[in-house]
Amino acid sequence: MARHRRTAIDLRYLASGVALVLLIAGPRLIRSESPPEATEDPAVALTSNGITPDAAHVLDYLRQFIPTDEQRARIKSLVEQLGSDDYAAREEASRQLRTLGFSAVGALRAAAGSADLEVRVRAEILLAEWERGGRSKCGSLLRAALAWLQRSHEPHAIPLLLSLLSAPPETDLQPSLCQALWACAGPHDAEQLARAIEQGNCDVKCAAIPALELVLGESAIPKLRGYLDDKDDRIRLAAVRALIDRLPKESVNGLLQTLSSTDPSIRAQAAWLLQQASNIPPNQEPLDLEIATARWKAWAATAAAEHPRPLGAKRLQLTWYGLLLRELFADEAASVTGAYHQFHYEATVKAKAEVRGGILRLESSVEEADHRLFVTSRELLGQPTFPRRFLVKARLGGEAAMPGAWHVGVSIGKAKFLFHPGVDGGAFRIETVDEHRYLLQSPPMPFLPAADVLHDMTLDVTRNDDGSVRCQVTIRDGGKSGREFTTSITLNKTDVGEIERIGLERSGRAGGAALFGPITIQALPVAP
């Protein structure tokens, strides 16, 4: 796939399924209000996949992801049967759930968090099969269908969109579902949206709250005002989106409160809304995020905060402040040989890289090989290094073949952070990229990072004044157990280098493919 060189700031929205980029000036951020680049007409993508771009056919395509009442009852029974004492009954339940395909995905996601080990493991296996196979049948096509609804403002889509929001077939689909819901909602949907806010799960509430304001206008204030003080950061942020132009002072206070969220994506969206409402910093003025936060708090204490800039449609943009890159691997690539979007590809020996079904796959059939996709600060940001402090979040894992013979991970500069999928305890370690010299070999992780499952790795990286780098590493079990492994290390400048690149890594001997889902790189304020 051709790599696009950019000389201008590229701001795409999360809902587009491609990377978002903000430039850096030294440790300072530069923002732009440039509109998103034009994307492919969703009608073209639908037509090329055999779907007629009209309301009847697009809605029919999306309905396959929503189980009927009869299917829900059957799925519920089959999920319970996964925990049967009878092995044959468990096998039959797995077989039938496999045949139900997309309609069972939502229930299986819930079952993957079950306290019953047998139910949890079998649900995880079925979900992994879907990730490898069935997911590739929808992928970007799902987003194209939702983009078509958004452009056409299809008035009959609301019940279907709310159902999809309650159990999305893809974990990264919520932004696209929100944008479609907000575009399609009309006054006749007010009662249904109000009911969704009262009875729906968090994803449904977060989408329905702005939608209700869009269809009711000022009369929505009494119904939504209380959510500005909600304990859930996501719901509070949704209420701000709905009401910031109607109740500016209360909404600004809600945004300031949301800046302390433990979820970096929520913090980044709240910060972007504050920047837009306050014009602090003005467009293109470089300013550190920590300084910006202090200025927002000072501004909020003045009378000016009672009359912020009207945001209009901007309040519905799912944009992050401080986001450097967000890659969803939504574009298929049968063979990645030189580059993929902002990423370069390199390998020490002949190997294979492909993107399929929203997953980057790095495969090797030789005894010893290193290969990776990586981004550089020079080409991504126009700077010799990444910011002084930044966060990398990646979903990664590997197939169940030759566990222990190879590993998967993320590299920061010259150091890479690795674990072995399918190996009890994960055998986490940090080593140098080129020499494979160990920098840290930790005690066992408190869970087995199961094969065919994507796990969440977070790296909080801070460069110290002496050039050394502190790395806080967290790996969360993608098997829904809730268990986490955390370690912290300070690497000297010689071992980590200048941090001019960040990579997705597979190294070691022949075995299964390394699997990578979405990756985010975000600038952070330096801790005091």
Image: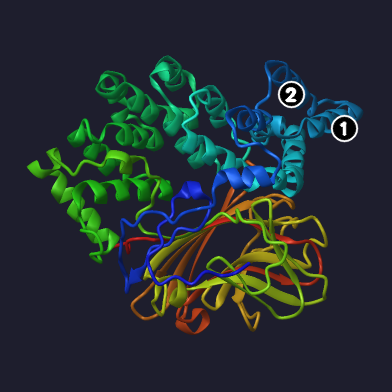
Q: Which amino acid does label 1 sit on?
A: Glu
Residue at image coords 33%, 26%: 213
* Distance CA(mark 1)–CA(mark 2): 14 Å
Q: Where is residue 120 in the image (x, y as percent from the top left)?
A: 72, 36
Q: In the picture provided, is 91 more to the left or to the right than 118?
A: right
Residue that numbered label 1 is attached to: 91
Disc 2 marks which residue? 75
Q: Which residue is drawn at 38% across and 66% down?
A: 389
Amino acid carrying mark 2 in the image: Ile
502 vs 192: above or below: below
Say whether disc 1 or disc 2 marks the residue closer to the N-terminus: 2
Secondary structure beneath label 1: helix
Question: Is 157 rendered above or below residue 303?
Answer: above
Q: Residue at x 25, y 23 (%)?
A: 218
Quick one: label 1, few (<14), some, or many (20+) residues within 10 Å?
Answer: some
Residue 112 is situated, as x and y percent measured from the top left of the image, at 67, 36
